[in-house]
Image: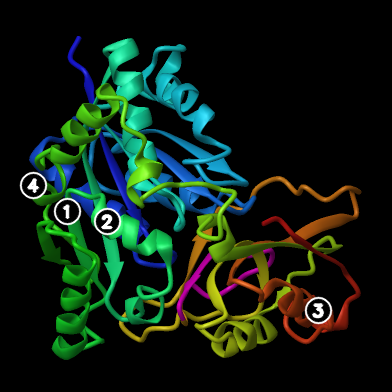
């Protein structure tokens, strides 16, 4: 049986990795209605938001069943560090080696979407190791997504951003439309400053042709294999990944986990939530992801994004917020997960912040006025730092 190609999609927080992948699904189904994609998705937080969005998109991407054969979401850490050992198990499950293919058929391709702070070379080496040991996989390439609108804010200071741009096969410049050509040219110059002699392409609102993203030259894979076979240590050439140094990439973000519980049938105050979404500074808050029950109308940030349907009793949404923009995606309400029969979880949220911001934002959220139940109902708000 032929090896399953694996594509790694990396990029900084909020760059648009998930949007890029979602826009590939209808293209794949249009070219081959039986084509199936499996996903391994990594999040620092403990809320599995992206897997729900992707599964919903896969089910609606074309006739003849879902384009997604399976999804595994690795939560609570970085896949290239403390979760790297789980990658093999996830790939075996999705490929059907452990039975069931993660709940679907054997995929034609697996896409590995990293957290916003992952080191792509480590993942490429791990995929190549698994490929050699099992013969079941083949690294097809590494794609890095760059947020043109916001990249200027961290490319000079982020060790990981430099590595993500350099150790890649294809750079996708995203969100350049609103930023303008001058900002795009500035980012292109900065990419050159990073010694990244890499092919690049501009997306169209997160859309890039599948023939560009998939099937690209795996030059990175062969180069890393040669270095590994020669016994070279990457840490010795200035591109290491030491977690004991000041360049430890996990120090680039801090993560809060938020839970709000309250009486059955009482949702989150939508107006106060919108206040949080509209006032959170982009320099401090990188991403907000949540699953919530809303009481009252909610709206998306961009006028060209269709508004979510009007909220009904117990309306449930997935919230995705990145650099000041957000969308609400309605989902089918699930069984209540409150600790008592008369209680429900109105909100589960992950907030990904810049360095040294978690203490301030923990106090701000706990102070009230942003995450509260509708109608002045008393709830139980718990804010914990994860990273």
Was residue 289 drawn as part of the magenta stretch in this picture? Answer: no
Q: Is residue 204 visible?
A: no
**Residue at position x 17%, y 31% in the image:** 222
| Circle 2 residue | 144
Graded by Cα atoms within 10 Å as few (under 14), some (14 to 19) or many (20 or more), the crowding at tag 4 reads: few
SS class of the residue under badge 1? Answer: strand
Q: Residues within 10 Å of mark 3 (few under 14, many from 20)?
A: few
| Label 2 environment density (alpha carbons within 10 Å; few <14, some 14–19, many ≥20) | many
Give the mark nearest the N terminus, 4 or 3: 4
Quadrant housing the C terminus: bottom right
Look at the image and give the residue range highlighted in magenta.
309-323
Which of the marked residues, 3 or 2, is nearer the chain's N terminus?
Answer: 2
Picture layout, residue 254 above or below residue 371: above
Label whose residue precedes the other's in the sequence (2 or 1): 2
Given residues 150 and 299, the one toward you in this image is 150
Where residue 378 appears, x then y in whole percent?
A: 91, 74
The total number of labels drawn is 4
Is label 4 or label 3 in front? 3
Assign a secondary structure to mark 3.
helix
Q: Is residue 204 left or right of residue 360?
A: left
Report helix, strand or loop for mark 2: strand
Can you tell which mark lies on residue 211? 4
The location of residue 99, given as percent across then percent down, is: 45, 12
Question: Residue 268 vs residue 382: left or right?
Answer: left
Q: Residue at x 65, y 48 (%)?
A: 334
Marker disc for residue 363: 3
């Amino acid at each position: 049986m032929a090896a399953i190609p694996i594509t790694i999609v990396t990029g900084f927080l909020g760059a648009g990795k998930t949007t890029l992948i979602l826009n590939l699904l209808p293209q794949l189904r249009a070219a081959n209605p039986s084509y199936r994609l499996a996903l391994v998705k990594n999040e620092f937080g403990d809320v599995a938001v992206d897997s729900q969005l992707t599964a919903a998109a896969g089910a609606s991407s074309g006739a003849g069943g879902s384009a997604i054969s399976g999804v595994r979401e690795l939560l609570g850490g970085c896949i290239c560090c403390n979760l790297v050992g789980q990658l093999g198990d996830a790939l075996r499950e999705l490929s059907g080696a452990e039975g069931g293919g993660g709940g679907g058929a054997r995929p034609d391709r697996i896409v590995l979407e990293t957290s916003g702070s992952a080191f792509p070379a480590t993942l490429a080496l791990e995929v190549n190791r698994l490929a050699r040991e099992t013969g079941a996989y083949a690294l097809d390439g590494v794609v890095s997504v760059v947020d043109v609108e916001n990249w200027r804010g961290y490319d000079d200071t982020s060790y990981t951003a430099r590595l993500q741009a350099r150790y890649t096969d294809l750079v996708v410049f995203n969100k350049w439309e609103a930023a303008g050509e001058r900002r795009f040219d500035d980012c292109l110059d900065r990419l050159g400053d990073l010694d990244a002699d890499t092919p690049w392409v501009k997306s169209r609102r997160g859309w890039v042709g599948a023939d560009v993203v998939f099937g690209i030259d795996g030059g990175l894979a062969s180069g890393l294999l040669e270095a590994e076979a020669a016994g070279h240590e990457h840490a010795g050439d200035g591109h290491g990944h030491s977690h004991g140094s000041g360049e430890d990439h996990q120090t680039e973000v801090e993560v809060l986990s938020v839970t709000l519980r309250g009486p059955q049938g009482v949702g989150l105050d939508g107006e106060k939530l919108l206040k949080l979404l509209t006032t959170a500074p982009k320099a401090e808050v990188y991403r907000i992801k949540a699953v919530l029950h809303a009481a009252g109308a909610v709206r998306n940030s961009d006028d060209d994004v269709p508004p979510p349907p009007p909220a009904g009793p117990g309306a449930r949404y997935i919230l995705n917020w990145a650099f000041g923009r957000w969308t609400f995606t309605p989902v089918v309400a699930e069984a209540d997960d409150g600790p008592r029969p008369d209680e429900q979880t109105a909100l589960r949220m992950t907030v990904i912040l810049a360095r040294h911001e978690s203490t301030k934002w923990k106090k701000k959220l706990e102070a009230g006025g942003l995450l509260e139940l509708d109608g002045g109902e008393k709830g139980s708000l718990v804010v914990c730092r994860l990273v």
